[in-house]
Amino acid sequence: MTSIAITSFKGELPALTPRLLQPTNAQVARNVNLRKGSLRAESAPLPVTGITGVINPSSIYRYPFGNNGLGFWFAWGNGLQVNVAKSPLAKDSWSRVYWTGDSFPKMAPIGVATQGDGPYPSGFYRLGIPAPESAPIVAEDNGSTEAPMTLVNAAYIVTFVSAYGEEGPPSLASNIIARWDSANDQVGSRVKVQMPPVVSGPYNLVTKRLYRSESGGEYLHVADFNIAQEMWVDEVNSENLGIACPSLTWDMPDASMVGLVEMPNGIMAGFFDNTLCFSEPFHPHAWPIDYQIAFPDKVVGIGVTSAGLVVATTGRPRLITGTTPAAMADSAPDADRVCVGRGSVVDMGEYVAYASTEGLVAVSGGEPQLITEGILTPEQWQALNPASIHACRYEGRYLAFYDGGCFALAPGEGIEFIDAHAASSYYDIAASSLYLIQGSTISKWRGGSPMTYRWRSKVFEFPPGAANFSCGKVAADAYPVQVVVVADGATVLDIDIHDHQMFRLPPGYAEAREWQVEASGTTEVFSLQIANTPSELT
């Protein structure tokens, strides 16, 4: 008894000769969706809205707030790779959003980002709060009215605070002044404080905050003022000072920081040049220099995984672990796996994948693995122009768009090629939907009609005379299904199958050694069979 029965369908393994493939793997798997093991058609993207007012759109983001619950599409163009993150606060009254890749790092609340008729975001503030450019100047005021009790040496600093309560780093310290402090609510020395002027720029600064240090101690809160106030007389006793200044190290992010990602515990991360940066937990405007980690190689992209933060570089990847930005640990595997494109870096859950010069790399807790090994040769990988890849995780697969098309790859299962092109992609977690930029249109992945698939089996080899195939059968959800049978390189049969009944093959190929079976169409196929006798068909 001799037959070919294919009841499970997987992707291509181009690195192997067709004779060495497993029966379930394909020589050709195009426009297929093999997630369930059956042979199904991938659906075409469906245009959902246009992108107006943006030249050559290259990045999109679905802002989920406003517009009567419909939200807004944000878009950037001219090749900008923009990374967007929502506020780490569970209930942010201003529905703030943060992004990098569009000049300096930026943020905007809903009323600024969505004002007007678009394109959006229609406004922004620079991310971070600047430090005052000069120190406060203090002098004794001659208006003391009570007998002094204690002499202390005092110094002052000033911070700026935004309309959203974001406090920035302090000014330089003032000159030191001797002041008399009284007790029992009596007024001691009065100190005249000349505060530094407000810094100009795209900030929403509303408050100056004054702190005082006595005898070299902490800077404690004295008072808040309108941002325009320049002079004030301090007569606050030591016992009435407030909390210590929390923002002594809350620097602005570097102006060239890109690659913004959200991490657990309210932390955000980004990078510039060879430097990785972390924000203060739940304070995305504050990026202390003390939290930065520098590497020997330039950072190309970063991705968050369950094992930690993976940093893909022009040399060795790094794995950063820790629960607080002040205690992040850096480890480097003993392998150079160069990353060739920021858009290729994808969180796959248990690992981060990215495009290297040799293939697709996976990094988690151990050594980086080349997950395209055995699927694509280095030459086949280079033919896909890996530097052009932008990708995302979709249904457990690495879904990549490159200059030339699209592929979906699942480790251990193979690769499938899809006739789709996109300038960029964005996965909307809330809607569980993937969106593409196609020209000046946003399209929903898998939203359109089924594409015509083509799946060709491996080469099955038989001794001469053993494969006298005379009949076949296709089990499908619907028909027609086009079936092609090839023997020793010649097309034996090319026919549309219209039902589940047995079909006949022409005679004359009993001596053929090499057989292949191919199916194409748009309907789901559960099995392909050819056999010597009808009794061998199931």
Image (tube, helix red, strand yellow):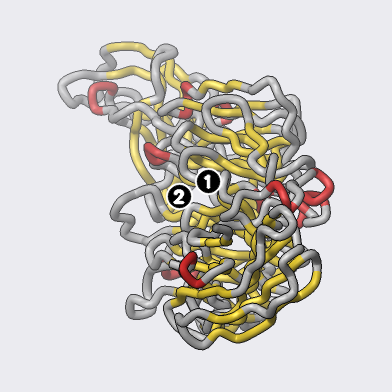
* 48 or 60: nearer the viewer: 48
Residue 229's mark? Answer: 2
Residue 239 versus residue 50 in the image, above or below: above
Q: Please state, as top left, top right, bottom left or bottom right, where the C terminus lies in the image.
A: bottom left
Left or right of 510, for residue 218:
left
In space, the residues marked 1 and 2 are separated at their CA atoms by 48 Å
Residue located 63% across and 33% down the image: 369
| Residue 291: image tag | none
Amino acid tagged 1: Asp
Q: Nearer the viewer, residue 529 or 47?
A: 529
Q: Position of residue 400 (x, y in %)?
A: 64, 58
Q: Residues within 10 Å of mark 2 (few under 14, many from 20)?
A: some
Question: Label 1 neighbourhood size at 10 Å, few (<14), some (14-19), many (20+)?
Answer: many
- Residue 337, position as x, y percentages in the image: 72, 33
Query: Tag 2: residue type?
Result: Gln
Q: How many marks?
A: 2
Q: Between 369 and 502, which is closer to the camera in this rendering?
A: 502
Q: Residue furthest left?
A: 184
Residue 52 against residue 23 in the figure, above or below: below
Left or right, 313 with reference to 453: right
Mark 1: secondary structure: strand
The residue under label 1 is: 347
